[in-house]
Image (tube, helix red, strand yellow):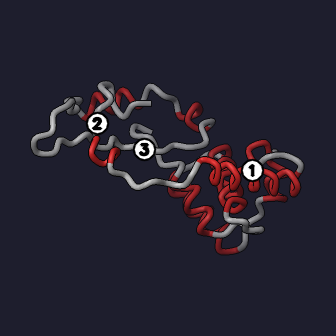
Amino acid sequence: MNPCPCGYAGQVRSPGQKGPVCRCTPDQVHRYSSKVSGPLLDRIDLHIEVPGQSAAMLINAPAGESTALIQKRCHHARLLATQRQGCSNHALSSASLDKHAALGVDALAYMTQVATHFGWSGRSSHRVLKIARTIADLAQSANIETAHIAEAVQYRRPVAGH
């Protein structure tokens, strides 16, 4: 979803740069983001803010990883999950999640602290655990570590108005 009704919230203009700038009031932004219900947001795995970039930054950006390399890493992580539990991580049931995404003492304490802080529902907490399991698989880690949960939490940032 856009960050505000006009779609340009947070857009800053550099000296000499032209283009749209947000003129939405904080109240308009809050009303706009409140149109998406909390239960619907619970069903969306990743909440990521993607800020706009200048044309110069996009044009001069260094080359990233190749799509083929990323695809290979993702395929391997999916294969690990399927061999371990017979399905991909997103398809884990609650009972399977307890078995295949069990947390150590430190990771459990961190997950509990974060879920309490954000007031997450059980559904939201389970989604973060599934994402953390995937991050651990991408890192070729048999266990979900606190760092994997911390990264997964970053993908569940609260949406304004919620």
Q: Position of residue 72 (x, y in %)?
A: 70, 52
Instruction: Tell me the SS state at disc 3.
Output: loop
Question: Sequence-wise, which precedes: disc 1 or disc 2?
Answer: 2
Q: Which residue is mark 3?
A: 49
Judge by depth and name the residue closer to the eye, 13 or 152. 13
Q: Position of residue 30 (x, y in %)?
A: 34, 33
Is the C terminus in the top left, top right, bottom left or bottom right quadrant?
Answer: top left
Instruction: Tell me the SS state at disc 2.
Output: loop
Q: Amino acid at mark 3?
A: Glu
Q: Amino acid at mark 2?
A: Ala
The crowd level at tag 2 (other Cα within 10 Å; few <14, some 14-19, many 20+) is: many
Answer yes or no: is residue 96 visible: yes
Question: Sequence-wise, which precedes: disc 3 or disc 2?
Answer: 2
Instruction: Tell me the SS state at disc 1.
Output: helix
Q: Position of residue 77 (x, y in %)?
A: 74, 55
Q: Which mark is residue 9?
A: 2
Position of residue 108 in the picture relative to residue 2 (left or right): right
Disc 1 to disc 3, C-alpha distance:
26 Å
Give the image quarter of residue 4.
top left
The crowd level at tag 3 (other Cα within 10 Å; few <14, some 14-19, many 20+) is: few
Question: Sequence-wise, which precedes: disc 1 or disc 3?
Answer: 3
Q: Which mark is residue 75?
A: 1
